Image: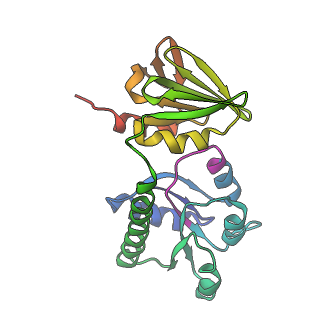
Amino acid sequence: MRCIIIDDEKLSREILSVLIFKSSDLILAEEFSNAIDAIKYLNEDNEVDLIFLDIHMPNFSGIDFIKTIKNPPKVIMVTTDQNFALEAFNYDCINDYLVKPIQGERFDRAVERSKLKKEKKLTSTAPNVDLTSTEIYINIDKRLVKIDISTIKYIHAFGDYIDIITETVNYKVHTSLKKIEEKLLPFNFLRIHRSYIINLNKIIDIQDATALIGKSVIPISRNKRKPLIESLNLL
């Protein structure tokens, strides 16, 4: 699971970083000393599965952070104040509550709980994906147009529209990148940039921060490069 730390105390961030490094289930993507920078990071569509979040921070508390974020990832609260436990569990995204100083065994149990909830969610949503269907329908000028998923090379988002680039025809559709991403992910597609989803089967080569698909050079976000490489069948 990709995780981030939000805590204004440097020592606390360092302790959490060490515990995360020791865990085989976690990858530390970023750490933040304030919630505002973390919100900006999440708004850039960076992939995060779990947040270690301090409650007491200057100007903008951990609870303020949760109230601000739409559809937040799973959260493990980290604090010195046990009195916030009851309030914390009023929020569905909060999986556990760690009291400082954090003990390694207690940390591991909190991570395991978050991991099990993530796996349960994936299992419960999997039946909704129809892997037998190889087409999607898009609305073009009040017509439903069928597209063979295997012919899609990549999708580019701009404003309230997306361009669906296929081997033969390009389509402009009024929808969000997130909506089509949910339908295409099971079919070997991957979001490699806040504005691009690509068909992994159409990649010609990858160099530095770009992927070549056909004659198009697609940018790869810094935080998306590792998931992209891990998804490829490397020799």
Question: What's the image's color scheme?
Answer: rainbow
The image quadrant that residue 132 belongs to is top left
Residue pictured at 40% horizontal, 29% vertical: 200
Instruction: Give the camera-side residue of 147 and 186.
Output: 147
Instruction: Give the camera-side residue of 218 and 21.
Output: 218
Q: Which residues are magenta?
A: 41-52
Q: Is residue 56 positioned above or below 185 on the image? A: below
Residue pictured at 39% horizontal, 78% vertical: 106
Q: Position of residue 31 (x, y in %)?
A: 55, 55
How many marks the image carries: the answer is: 0
> Can you say which quadrant of the picture contains the N terminus?
bottom left
Q: Position of residue 78 (x, y in %)?
A: 55, 74
- Residue 11 magenta-highlighted: no
Q: Position of residue 135 (x, y in %)?
A: 47, 33
Most distant residue in the front direction: 143
The image quadrant that residue 234 belongs to is top left
Most distant residue in the left direction: 235
The image quadrant that residue 228 belongs to is top left
* Res 174 seen here: yes
In the displayed structure image, the side of residue 73 where residue 58 appears, left or right: right
